[in-house]
Image (tube, rainbow, N blue to C red):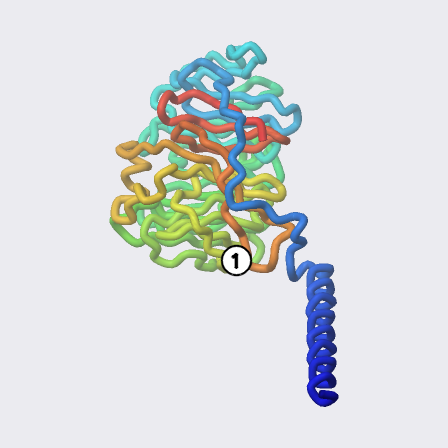
Amino acid sequence: NMNNFLKIILIVIVIGVVGAGTYFAFIFLRERGILGDPSEETPTDTISETVPKKIVSEVIADYWINRKTGEVYYLSENGNIKKVLANGTGEIVSSQTIDNVGGLKPSFDGTAVLISMGHPKAGGFAVFNLSSKTWQPLPAGTVAAAWDSVSSNRLIYLKDSGAFSQLFYFNLTDQKSTEVQRLAQKDLEVEWISQNLIVFTDKPSRQYASSIRSFNLQNKTIQTLIREGAGAMIKWNRTGQLGISWSGDLELIDATGRTISRLDLNTIPTKCGFSDSQIYCAAPSNQNSVSSSSYPDDYLKRALKSNDDLFVIPLVGLSAGEFPVIRLASLESDAERIEIAGDQLLFLNRFDKNLYLLEL
């Protein structure tokens, strides 16, 4: 009858209005970046057929990229510094031998490198300049050091002074030290993540609670980023604005320590690297193999090795707070020290201690 007909017409009109309103609301939110564009969404598994290739056939201690030239350099186990050549060999840049190499930190542009030796207690630190091919030692008693976030001519270092630690600037040109601060804490790692921000990290261990704090060089204030987290560690991006933290769970944080998102992946920050728009992490193919009771101690002591997959976490084109973890490739390696240069990803394989490259 006429009443039923009018009811049907009314229902159709209401559905149409609601549908149109929902559509235009979605467009409004997407255009303002609140919702991601579906055209930019990536499936949770996009397995690449490309495989990593070994780019130098030599056991190495560590490596870095000269960001000005794109050239890759590495530190051999005996301390020689070499440049990777296209034929897979290394050209010697410095024949200086180093007993018990501890590790390296490149300057922000990769034109110089800070090398620790005699790790972890004895020995010292020295800087090698690629342009002049010269070595320069840091002051005696240095226990930790880091580059200025925007300069290859200045560092900051910690010195153990018995009852406390002293923080100094060190200028490579005049080789002068300037005291910045005295700290009650000892046995710290240090990173200079942005112009005015230093980060102090306790040595990570699952066996005791460790903290991570930032120190503002301008106003001399200290802020706790992670308080008493078991095995706490952070890997920062090149600008110091974003970090991958771990203290039981993997999280994306900002420079204040605020959690942006928890990341659904069992791995640690030393197996991750940043590009401008994405995070790449190597993680065990068998995610259930990661034991929270012994991680990261067993891994850092090299008592635990894993066969990894490569995962990517997009940082743009997504809804606020949504950071999906996407499986990208099988590495068939125990990968660490991931670095991204253009469309190439480099990593060290802990199985054979060789350097590998993956085309992205």
Q: Which residue is mark 1?
A: 260
Q: Indicate whether 223 appears above or below 194.
A: below
Q: Quadrant of the C terminus?
A: top right
Residue 108 in picture, x, y percent from top left: 59, 35
Q: Image check: 350 left or right of 88?
A: left
Question: Is residue 137 among what the camera can see?
Answer: no
Q: Indicate whether 343 appears above or below 29.
A: above
Residue 60 in picture, x, y percent from top left: 42, 20
Residue 136 in picture, x, y percent from top left: 51, 25
Q: Image check: 128 left or right of 18?
A: left
The residue located at (47%, 44%) in the rendering is: 235
Q: Quadrant of residue 18?
A: bottom right
Q: Residue furthest bottom?
A: 3
Q: Residues within 10 Å of mark 1 (few under 14, many from 20)?
A: some
Q: Residue furthest front?
A: 1
Q: Quadrant of the N terminus?
A: bottom right
Q: Nearer the viewer, residue 59 or 7?
A: 7
Q: Nearer the viewer, residue 85 or 118?
A: 85
The amino acid sitting under disc 1 is Ile
The residue located at (47%, 58%) in the rendering is: 222
Q: Image check: 11 left or right of 113?
A: right
Residue 237 in picture, x, y percent from top left: 55, 43
Question: Is residue 337 among what the camera can see?
Answer: yes
The residue located at (54%, 14%) in the rendering is: 93
Q: Nearer the viewer, residue 209 or 284?
A: 284
Q: Indicate whether 168 appears above or below 226.
A: above
The residue located at (40%, 32%) in the rendering is: 140
Total count of labels: 1
Q: Indicate the secondary structure of the residue bearing disc 1.
A: strand
Q: Indicate whether 326 appears above or below 123.
A: below
